[in-house]
Image: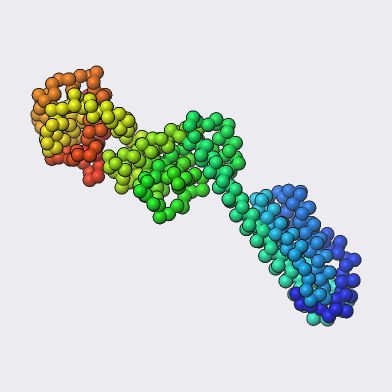
Amino acid sequence: MTVIDPPLAKSLSDMLRPHLPDAVEEIEREVRVHVHEGGPPVDADYRRAVRQVIDETVAHFVDSLGRHATDSTRLTELYSQLGAEAARRGYSLDRLQTALRLSGQVACRRFIKDAYRFSWPKETLSSLTDGLFGLLAQAADAGAQGFARQQGQLATDRERRRRRLRDLLVREPPPDPDLIHEQARAAEWRVPGTVAAVALLSAARPPSRILPPDVLADWDASYLIVPDPDSAGRDWLPTLLVPLGAAAIGPTVPAERTAVSLRWARHTSALMERGVLPSDRPQRAADHTALLAAAMVEDLIDTTSAVFLAPILALPPRRRVPLLTTLLTYLQCGDNAVITSARLQVHEQTVRYRLRRIAELTGSRVYDPADRLDLMITLTWLLHTDGITAAPGITAAPGSPAVTPARSAPS
């Protein structure tokens, strides 16, 4: 702050001090009209705090005239607290900065009037304005630091509350919906209509962890909770997951059943890690219901398949795979050889020959309606697991299962 000659400074202080209440009132009125009433409503307590800070700022400025050094610790603390309180209440830092700018304008207008009234030298007016704007710059810096510090603390607190919410959502047994809404309010998270859990493969090390703000993540446990996964169409979620590496998407469920979605996402990711499902793109658990069901009874399938399909399984892969694929596709197509041949892109007579060969090897039991569902699940598992590779006559995209499950079973 530019120092004014001590005798003149004392004279200025004595001259300005009686007008302090009027100056404070004018500044507060400008701030109220252009800041408090010019935007979202401001709490009455915060208005009182602003008025107190203005009062102390004006008094500090007048008292500091003529001093080589003044202790502004108290004022710095006040502005730091005011900035922190603005962040805590959700006000923008612009409000505080605008208030300081208006304060400077009011003070300058009053100084200019007094300069004309009392014939101050221009050096005196220049010193006053230099000192004023130096003080306001210091105040603005303290306010910004308090605001930033409080915002960081709020972000940390919100993250802590979101972690508690995330852990609550995946808890079993399912949490009470009222408790979810209570924790969500504390975490500033809107409870969506549905969620889907995403399991990241353990081998994945995401180069980027940038996610939409409403996605809850546990990077240590390698899963995400994604609100409203189907709201913008079916394809946006896999696109979001591309930067995160291989991932499995659980079924879409209400928020209180997030644990169910996570459980099936993890079952799906386990199959991806084993190579049963491709890991070069995100996989949806809902697209592999039969395979997931089969994985739950893998040891049982290993036992029962020997009873139903032992003669076929004893064949080498180039002969085994076409028979197993044809049988599964035939069952999926409602025992219709014409549709089966179109699905497999082979001649209808080839399909009929394979079906006869299957009957010769296994007997008619493989066509028993009572065993059909068990057989389809068993075949689905066998055609996805290690050791089964595509053979001539089997159309399969690279890295995909040998059979594409039928969408319907026409007769």
The answer to whether 186 is drawn above or below residue 90 in the figure is above
User: Which residue is at 39% across, 38% downward?
Assistant: 265
Is residue 19 among the parts visible in the rendering? yes
User: Which residue is at 21% across, 41% downward?
Assistant: 396
User: Which residue is at 17% across, 20% downward?
Assistant: 365
Quadrant in which residue 128 is drawn: bottom right
User: Which residue is at 17% across, 31% downward?
Assistant: 324
Q: Which x, y percent locates residue 22? A: 86, 62
Q: Which x, y percent locates residue 136? A: 73, 67
The answer to whether 150 is drawn above or below residue 106 in the figure is above
27 vs 152, left or right, is: right
Which sits in the foreground, 302 or 86? Answer: 302
169 vs 407, left or right, is: right
Which sits in the foreground, 246 or 14? Answer: 246
402 vs 285, left or right, is: left
- Image quadrant holding the C terminus, namely top left
Q: Which x, y percent locates residue 387? A: 19, 39
Quadrant in which residue 383 is drawn: top left
Is residue 125 among the parts visible in the rendering? no
Quadrant in which residue 270 is drawn: top left
- Image quadrant holding the N terminus, namely bottom right
Which sits in the foreground, 403 or 309? Answer: 309
Q: Which x, y percent locates residue 201? A: 37, 45
Q: How many labels does the image show?
A: 0
167 vs 152, left or right, is: left
Identify the coloring.
rainbow
The answer to whether 376 is drawn above or below residue 12 in the figure is above
The answer to whether 127 is drawn above or below residue 276 in the figure is below
